[in-house]
Every structure is written in C-alpha cells, then in structure tokens.
Image (tube, rainbow, N blue to C red):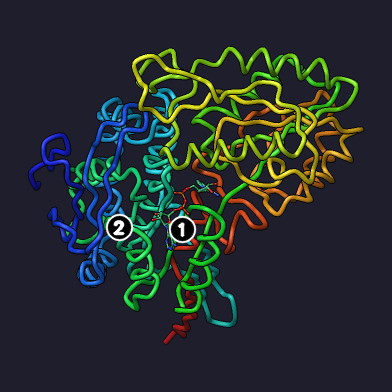
C-alpha cells in the first residue's frame, strides 16, 4: 500500500499510475476552490500527452494478466472497496461538500448511489454469463461468451464527483478490463480520495488508474490507439464532440449529455406532495443535477393553487453552507457558473416570464465569498423562452399552465433533450399515456427525481445521450465486453 497522499497538507492533486502517486507533467493547472467559502483547496496540475501515454501503456500491460484471472478473484478487491467506501462515507461526504458545494445529505445520498454500483458489479460472475445450447446441430454444442477488451476510460463531470465514476469503474474491472478515470478538473478531490481507497482495496497495479487534466487530456485519451472505449458524462456540446472523435478513432463510446427536464401535474394529483417534490427536484444540489426537473407544466384548473404551494415550499428552502445540517441549497460550483445562472434569470425577466420569487439577493452570513443563489421561481413560462428550452443548472424553476396532459406531453417532447420527466397524477390512464408517449429515458410517476437504481441502466434520449448502451447495470457488461460464439463437434469415437 502506498502512503496516503494528504490533500490537506500538500494541496496538490496527483495522478495514480501503476499503483503509485505521480505528478502530472502538463503545462496548465487550475486551483480547486471551496464554492461556499472561497478557500483554496488544492492545485490541480494537468497531465501531458506523455502522462497519458504512460498510463495507457501501463493499463494495457496490466490487462494482459488481469483479464485472465478467475472472475471470483477479480471481484474480491471490489468487495473490499465497498467496505472501505462505507467505512469512509462520512469523511468522503464532507470532502465532497467542500469541493462541490452541495449539502451533506445530497453528498451522502450520492455516495450511497455510487456504492450501489460496486455492489452490483460484485455480481459479475452471474451477470457476465452468456447462453449455451447442447445439440444446437447434429453432434454440435454451441455457447456464447463475453470477453474483456483492454483499457477503458471515463471522463466525468463536476456535479456528482463521488457517484458518476462508479457508474463505470466497478463494471470495467470486474469484467476483466483495466480502467482510467479523468475526473472533472473543477473538483477532483473526491476522485483523489477514492483512488487512495482503491489502493487500499488491493487491485493489482495498473488495473485502475487516475489521470487529472482538462480538454487536452481528454483529447489525448480519445486519440490514443491503446484505449478501447470511452464513457463520457458532461454537457451536450462536449458529449457530441467526444462521441464523434472517439467513434472516428474506432472506439466504443457512450456519451451522456445535458438535459432540460419537465414535471407534469394533473388535477388528480396530491398537490402538496407534488409541490414539495417539484421544488426539491429543481433546487436540490443547487439545481446542478442532470435530472433536475425545472419546467413544471400544470393543468389550468389547479395552476393558481399549485403555484402558491410551490412558492410556499421554495421560500422555505434554507440556502447556506452544505456542511450545516439545516442547509437545503448549497453553493454553486464557481462564481462563473453563478453568473451564468444569473444571466438566465435576467433572460427570463426580459422575455416576459413572471418573476414570482427572486433568489438573487440571498445572503449567507459568514460566507460572503460563496457562490450562493436562492430558489427562484418564474410563472407563465412559455415554450419559446430561453429559460424553458435551455439547461440552467441552478435553483431556478418555471411554471406554466397547460390545458391537459396531451398539451403537456407535446410541449415536453418538443425539447431537444430527453433525459428525465415526472408526472404527478392520481389517474392510471394519465400515467399510462405518459409512459407510452414521453420521448424520454428516465420517467417517474409520483416520483420527483427519476434516478434509476444501479441494477437498472441510466441514460437519456435525444441530445441527452449519444450512443446505445447506457451507464450502470447490465448495459455496462455489454459495453465492456465483446461477444463470441464457440461451436464444437466431438463425435463419439
Ligand atoms: P463539461 O462538459 O463542461 O465537462 C465534463 C468533462 O468534459 C470534464 O471532465 C471536462 O474536463 C471535459 N471537457 C470539458 N470541455 C472539454 C472539451 N472542450 N474537450 C474535451 N473535454 C472537455 O460538464 P460539467 O460542467 O462538468 O457538468 C455539467 C453537465 O453535465 C451538465 O450539462 C449536466 O446535465 C451534464 N450531466 C449529465 C448527466 C447525464 O447522465 N446525462 C449526468 C451528470 C451531468
């Protein structure tokens, strides 16, 4: 086991290569800042092409041995990793809050969702099996097999630094591949700690590696002939670039993009419940969730009543430092991103939406340097408005009246995105219509935020996803393996 790299003391993020901590050797670097306090947390040096070359070569070397180890052996370090993640969950959650700005409850929930993926991947001995058939033809038996492929990489965003790497990593190595993580350069500290725990869990050197950096590091991975496949999660423009570039280079690729998600509320819904879930979905994690539902389409007959409930609920949200237990909405990732969200609020006002609750003047005592925005609610948001079409990624929601569920579904389906949506209703017929007609990957009925458990796949449609196999669960087994068939004849002598 290598010595733990104490971030608190050295304040420099490092790569994890071939079982050792190494300095990245690129020219650029970034400073990671606590979004609530402004405190500098770490320097993030970016990796050079030579760093990527070394990591990929090491990964390929490790693959030679790892891929031929018995599957039971491959999952033992995953069991240990699960135990370590649970043992260190509180510490990781605190680090996550300091590096991201979200609340402690959100951080704990995110880590739990990540650990779930490690648990599912421990079932690889069953999940990786394929079918076989005796006497498929005269004297012939046939069996299908799945084989690992080599080095895979995942490029992940800032908003779930504890969970999203675990959508991929456990499945990649359980199936026999080696794996490289390139976390968001904005908040890489949780990945750094995760790899300290990975080191402790005892994976063979080179099977799991960490490379820090920005776009150049991503491009070096996308162009590297030693990389078999790429998983990407981030904004739509970058997801599209990554998808195209990786595919041009002959790699497997799955690329999750951005979102604009809707909630539909019908007059048969439990309105108080729906209002609480809608506000939480739009504003939790500061609205920085790809599953945040921030356009709420409400049947006209209940629009005024529901709007009042939403305003009551939104006004009660406590904005503050994520480490304070009473905080509901933490800080946004950076001052630049806070400005972007403020620009969206201004655009909403200029386009004529009704500003019902304005979060721009929020002040958090003792945290004057934090990137805080209070919950902001617009009414009468029309389909053509920018705040109705574009991903805001802040605690801003818009309400709009609709004649009925048909109009709501039509409006929702006009979006270029298709990540998530929820319906609140007491009608099974409405629920069925929604399920059949929504052009969206993750659908919830009477559920505020439709995030599938790790044993189901996770991925959107349309411009929210490029590729075919989604993250998590069984899709990961297909992504990380190639299929083969054995056809055998052993005639009786
Ligand atoms: P981002 O696209 O800015 O960055 C994501 C990753 O891409 C980072 O690791 C970054 O280093 C890299 N990157 C950035 N610019 C690049 C470039 N020009 N070339 C190559 N690589 C580049 O996204 P973000 O701001 O970190 O995350 C927020 C976005 O992620 C939102 O749009 C959100 O909806 C989306 N997201 C989607 C899902 C999903 O499942 N669909 C989940 C989480 C987040």
Q: Is the shortest distance between ligand 1 and the CB of mark 2 under 8 Å?
A: yes
Residue 202 position, x and y percent, is 18, 48
Residue 460 position, x and y percent, is 62, 51
Q: Is the shortest distance between ligand 1 and the CB of mark 1 under 8 Å?
A: yes
Query: In the rendered image of this protein, does residue 455 appear above or below residue 326?
Result: below
Question: Which residue position holds label 1?
Answer: 232
Lower position in the chain sequence, tag 1 or tag 2: 2
Helix, strand, or loop for circle 1?
A: strand
Residue 442 position, x and y percent, is 64, 43
* Residue mark closest to the camera, 1 vs 2: 2
Residue 341 vs residue 328, the one in the foreground: 341
The answer to which image quadrant residue 63 occupies is bottom left
Query: In the rendered image of this protein, does residue 23 appear above or below residue 285?
Result: below
Q: Would residue 237 be found to the left or right of residue 179 on screen?
A: right
Q: Would residue 45 be found to the left or right of residue 119 on screen?
A: left
Residue 281 visible in image: yes
Question: Which residue position holds label 2?
Answer: 213
Would you call the spot at circle 2 few (<14 residues within 10 Å), some (14-19), or many (20 or more)?
many
Q: Residue at x 32, y 75 (%)?
A: 226
Quote the CA–CA distance across marks 1 and 2: 14 Å
The answer to which image quadrant residue 230 occupies is bottom left
Residue 16 vs residue 62, the one in the foreground: 16
Q: Residue furthest front?
A: 350
Helix, strand, or loop for circle 2?
A: loop
Residue 259 vs residue 335, the one in the foreground: 335
Would you call the spot at circle 1 few (<14 residues within 10 Å), some (14-19), or many (20 or more)?
many
Marks counted in the figure total 2
Residue 350 position, x and y percent, is 71, 37
Q: Would residue 131 be found to the left or right of residue 349 on screen?
A: left
């Amino acid at each position: 086991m290598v010595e733990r790299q104490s971030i608190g003391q050295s304040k420099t993020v490092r790569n994890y290569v071939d079982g050792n901590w190494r300095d990245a050797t690129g020219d650029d670097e970034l400073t990671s800042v606590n979004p609530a306090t402004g405190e500098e947390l770490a320097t993030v040096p970016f990796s050079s092409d030579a760093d990527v070359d070394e990591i990929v070569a090491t990964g390929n070397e490790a693959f030679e041995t790892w891929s031929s180890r018995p599957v039971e052996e491959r999952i033992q370090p995953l069991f240990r990793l699960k135990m370590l993640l649970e043992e260190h969950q509180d510490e990781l959650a605190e680090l996550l809050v300091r590096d991201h700005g979200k609340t402690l409850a959100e951080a704990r929930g995110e880590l739990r969702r990540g650990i779930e993926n490690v648990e599912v991947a421990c079932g690889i001995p069953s999940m990786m099996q394929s079918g076989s058939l005796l006497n498929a033809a005269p004297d012939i038996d046939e069996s299908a097999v799945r084989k690992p492929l080599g080095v895979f990489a995942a490029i992940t965003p800032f908003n779930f630094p504890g969970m999203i790497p675990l959508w991929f990593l456990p499945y990649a190595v359980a199936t026999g591949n080696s794996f490289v993580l390139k976390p968001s350069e904005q908040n890489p500290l949780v990945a750094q700690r995760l790899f300290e725990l990975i080191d402790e869990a005892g994976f063979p050197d080179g099977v799991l590696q960490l490379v820090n950096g920005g776009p150049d590091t991503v491009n070096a991975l996308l162009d590297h002939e030693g990389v078999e496949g790429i998983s990407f999660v981030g904004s739509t423009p970058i997801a599209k670039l990554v998808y195209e570039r990786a595919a041009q280079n002959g790699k497997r690729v799955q690329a999750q993009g951005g979102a604009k998600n809707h909630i539909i509320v019908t007059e048969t819904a439990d309105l108080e419940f729906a209002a609480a879930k809608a506000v939480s979905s739009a504003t939790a994690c500061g609205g920085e969730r790809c599953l945040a539902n921030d356009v709420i389409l409400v049947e006209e007959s209940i629009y005024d009543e529901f709007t009042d409930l939403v305003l009551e609920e939104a006004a009660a949200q406590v904005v503050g430092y994520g480490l304070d237990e009473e905080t509901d909405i933490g800080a946004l990732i950076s001052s630049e991103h806070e400005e972007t969200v403020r620009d969206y609020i201004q655009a909403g006002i200029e386009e004529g939406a009704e500003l019902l609750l304005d979060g721009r003047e929020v002040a958090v005592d003792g945290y004057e340097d934090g990137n805080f925005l209070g919950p902001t609610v617009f009414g009468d948001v029309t389909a053509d408005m920018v705040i109705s079409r574009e991903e805001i990624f802040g605690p801003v929601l818009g309400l709009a009246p609709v004649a009925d569920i048909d109009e709501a579904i039509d409006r929702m389906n006009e979006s270029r995105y298709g990540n998530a949506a929820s319906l609140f209703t007491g009608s099974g017929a409405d629920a069925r219509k929604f399920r059949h007609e929504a052009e969206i990957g993750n659908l919830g009925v009477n559920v505020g935020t439709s995030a599938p458990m790790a044993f189901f796949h996770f991925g959107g449609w349309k411009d929210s996803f490029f590729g075919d196999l989604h993250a998590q669960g069984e899709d990961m087994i297909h992504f990380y393996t190639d299929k083969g068939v054995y056809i055998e004849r052993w005639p009786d002598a």
